[in-house]
Image: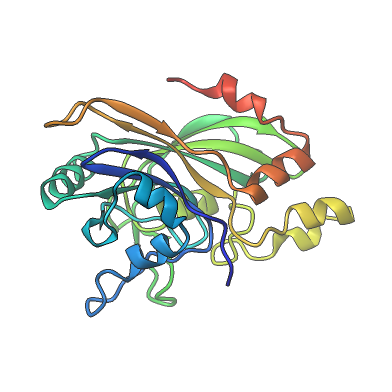
């Protein structure tokens, strides 16, 4: 499968921030701990890595994104930085902001989902809302409405597997293109052009922004990644102006 290129958003001697394209799996086996990084590097220009003096063998993945999710991904260039960033993530001091195109129009337009999550024993690929599960919380707000769908901003307060996808599905606002939790919902759309727009090749979930606090030897920084081509094209086809995101920034 051919992917879009992964691009470097930021690089210094300790940290690499990449805009991951959709379709790249970051899953790993214990016997192949570097496979996720290798797949990501295969989607990058060798000249970009060389320009920043990056040795592929030094890179350590700090966190992951689902295969269909695009956006910001952090890689540490040494073990100390990896431990530091992993700790900050686990203690919720690194802010993550996502964008998703979802079915329907959330009511209220902004709020918080706090349903606990647990593995779905009927399907090992999935998670589900379960009162006996682990606490999970997601803040959301609607940025724009279109026919059948809405563009929402998501701020996870916890980092459970598939958290954003499951919370939105449980709320009745499945992410467009999420076949695992939402299914082919575009089939109910009558207009052919709109049906094509709402049948993307990947789920339209994007890790849009990252905010790092001031850390040991690392300055406070904020990063942002442009949407994937397919996500941008969907917004354009729905009449949602990319300029709207400029006014939606809180940083």
Instruction: Find residue 193 and report its horizontal and vertical position in percent.
Output: 86, 52
The quadrant of the image that shows the N terminus is bottom right
Q: Residue at x 58, y 56 (%)?
A: 203
Residue nearest the observer in this picture, 242 or 119: 242
Q: Position of residue 37 (x, y in %)?
A: 33, 63
From the viewer's perspective, tell me whether residue 127 is left or right of residue 30: right
Residue 145 position, x and y percent, is 70, 33
- In this picture the colour scheme is rainbow
The C terminus: image quadrant: top left
Number of numbered discs: 0
The relative height of residue 144 versus residue 129 in the rendered view (above or below) is above
Q: Nearer the viewer, residue 131 or 72?
A: 72
> Position of 75 compared to 1: left or right?
left
Residue at 41%, 67% (x, y): give it.
Answer: 39
Which residue is at 39% across, 70% downward? 120
- Estimate the x, y position of residue 73 in percent, counting from the top left: 37, 48
- In terms of depth relative to the viewer, which is nearer, 136 or 155? 155
- Which residue is depicted at the point 54% across and 67% down? 180
Left or right for 177, reference 194 = left
Instruction: Give the farthest residue toward the bottom.
Output: 31
- Answer yes or no: is residue 147 visible: no
Is residue 138 among the parts visible in the rendering?
Answer: yes
């Amino acid at each position: 499968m051919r992917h879009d290129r992964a691009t470097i958003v930021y690089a210094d001697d300790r940290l690499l921030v990449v805009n991951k394209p959709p379709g790249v799996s970051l899953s790993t086996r214990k016997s192949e701990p570097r496979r996720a990084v290798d797949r990501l590097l295969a989607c990058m220009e060798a000249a970009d890595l060389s320009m920043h003096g990056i040795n592929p063998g030094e890179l350590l993945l700090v966190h992951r994104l689902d295969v269909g999710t695009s956006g910001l991904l952090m890689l540490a260039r040494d073990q100390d930085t990896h431990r530091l960033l992993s700790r900050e993530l686990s203690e919720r001091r690194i802010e993550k902001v996502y964008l998703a195109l979802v079915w329907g129009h959330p009511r209220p337009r902004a709020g918080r989902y706090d349903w606990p999550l647990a593995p779905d024993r009927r399907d090992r690929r999935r998670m589900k809302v379960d009162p006996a599960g682990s606490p999970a919380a997601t803040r959301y707000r609607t940025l724009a409405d279109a026919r059948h769908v809405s563009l929402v901003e998501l701020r996870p307060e916890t980092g459970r597997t598939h958290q954003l996808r499951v919370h939105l599905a449980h709320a009745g606002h499945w992410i467009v293109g999420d076949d695992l939790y939402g299914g082919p919902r575009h089939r109910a759309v009558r207009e052919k052009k709109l049906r094509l727009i709402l049948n993307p090749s990947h789920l339209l979930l994007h890790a849009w922004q990252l905010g790092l606090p001031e850390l040991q030897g690392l300055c406070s920084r904020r990063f942002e990644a442009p949407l994937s081509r397919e996500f941008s094209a969907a917004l354009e086809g729905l009449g949602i102006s990319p300029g709207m995101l400029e006014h939606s920034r809180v940083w």
